[in-house]
Image: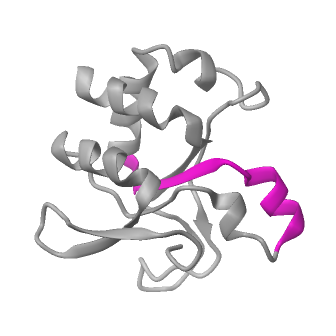
Amino acid sequence: MSDRHPTKRLREPGGSRADIDIMLVPLIKALWAAGYDTIGSCQDLGESLRRHERQSAYWKGYVLLEMPVADTLRLLNAAADSPLIDRMMHWAAPGAWEVGLPIMPVSPFNDDGDAEVTPWAQIHFPNDQIDDLIKAITAG
C-alpha cells in the first residue's frame, strides 16, 4: 500500500528488502527482532482505500498487519498480556481490534484451485495503539 503513504526501505531478516510505511517502521522492526514474520502492512487502511468510500470511512486510522496464522496467534497472546487486552475483547468496542482469516475464492495454494482459507491472518487495530503494541512485543 506504499502508493498512499511515505515509506522506508528496510532489510528483512531473510535479507530481502521491503518498503514499510513510515509510521509502521518501529513496529515492523520490533516484530522482526522478536522473530515474527510479516507478509504485508499499511499504516492507515482508510487512507489507502480512498476510492472506496464506505470501506475508507470504516478503516480510517486503522493499521493493517498481515502475518502467518501461527505468528498472529503468538502476537495476540503477547498483546493479551498487556493493557491492549481491553481493546481486543469485543470487535464493536471503540478502538477495538479485528482479526480475520481471508478466504481465497480460487486458491493458488492447492492443486485443484478450490476456495481455501489463506495461511495468513489480517489484524486491524487503531494506529494510535502502535506504541502500546511495541511495548507488548518487547516486554515478552
Q: Is residue 6 left or right of residue 138?
A: right
Residue placed most toward the observer, 110 or 136? 136
Q: Quadrant of residue 72?
A: top left
- Against 110, residue 58 (above or below) is above
Q: Residue at x 66, y 69 (%)?
A: 48
Relative image position of residue 81 (x, y in whole percent): 39, 15
Q: Residue at x 25, y 20 (%)?
A: 139
Relative image position of residue 105 (x, y in whole percent): 65, 76
Q: Is residue 9 left or right of residue 62?
A: left
Q: Quadrant of residue 89?
A: top right
Q: Is residue 16 visible?
A: yes
Q: Residue at x 77, y 71 (%)?
A: 50
- Against 40, residue 85 (above or below) is above
Highlighted range, magenta: 52-69
Residue 135 within the segment the image draws in magenta: no
Relative image position of residue 128 (x, y in whole percent): 57, 36
